[in-house]
Image (tube, rainbow, N blue to C red):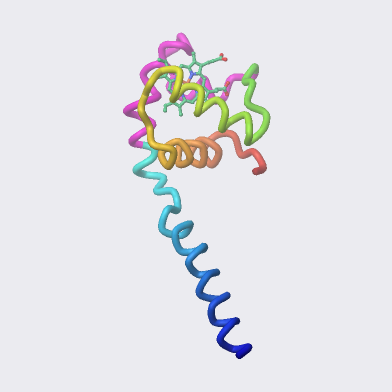
Amino acid sequence: MHAGKNGVKILAGLLICVPGFVQATDLTATRKLHDEKCVACHEQKSAFGDPDAIYRRSDSTVKSYQRLKTMVSLCNSELRLDLFPEDEQDLVVFLNETYYRLKK
Ligand code: HEC
């Protein structure tokens, strides 16, 4: 029964794709999360009260997508911000789309 096997494969494919689709990053919600959890401290660190400066600084160490993930993860775990892994992933996507534009 060839057709049946293919049917199973298609179904399995859908099951893998659908959750990815549902979890597509909601940039508005993520921006809000970022404003709440991340901005105040970065603003202080950048000295000029500019919330974005830390991402746009010329001596940024973030030169790759992997490094961006690492920094978000570091800030999250070091500071015990208690974000879920999904939130962390959303923040990476948000920061990359808004500032870094690094290739995955
Ligand atoms: C209590 C302070 C604090 C909080 C809160 C904080 N960060 Fe940071 N973050 C820092 C500091 C300090 C640096 C700079 C580290 C360095 O110079 O290596 C930094 C750097 C970064 C960088 C790298 C910037 C660059 O291009 O060089 C990213 C990305 C980042 N933080 C993401 C986040 C995210 C996302 C959150 C919120 C979930 C967050 N941070 C919350 C202190 C904080």
State the residue in front, 87 or 36. 87
State the residue in front, 89 or 57. 89
Measuring from the top left, give residue 37's x and y in whole percent.
35, 26
Left or right: where 102 falls relative to 7: right
Q: Residue at x 32, y 28 (%)?
A: 36
Q: Residue at x 55, y 69 (%)?
A: 13
Measuring from the top left, give residue 103's x and y in whole percent.
67, 42
Q: Check the image and report above or below for 56 versus 6.
A: above
Measuring from the top left, give residue 100's x and y in whole percent.
59, 34
User: Of all residues shown, which one is farthest toward the top?
Assistant: 47
Q: Residue at x 50, y 28 (%)?
A: 73
Measuring from the top left, give residue 42's x and y in whole percent.
44, 18
State the residue in front, 35 or 3. 3
Q: Is residue 46 magenta?
A: yes
Left or right: where 51 falls relative to 32: right
Q: Which residues are magenta?
A: 32-58
Instruction: Name the main secondary structure of what is drawn in magenta.
Output: helix
Which quadrant does the N terminus fall into?
A: bottom right
Q: Which image quadrant for residue 40?
A: top left
Left or right: where 7 falls relative to 77: right
Q: Check the image and report above or below for 60 versus 32.
A: above
Q: Residue at x 35, y 34 (%)?
A: 33
Q: Which image quadrant for residue 34?
A: top left
Q: Is residue 4 magenta?
A: no
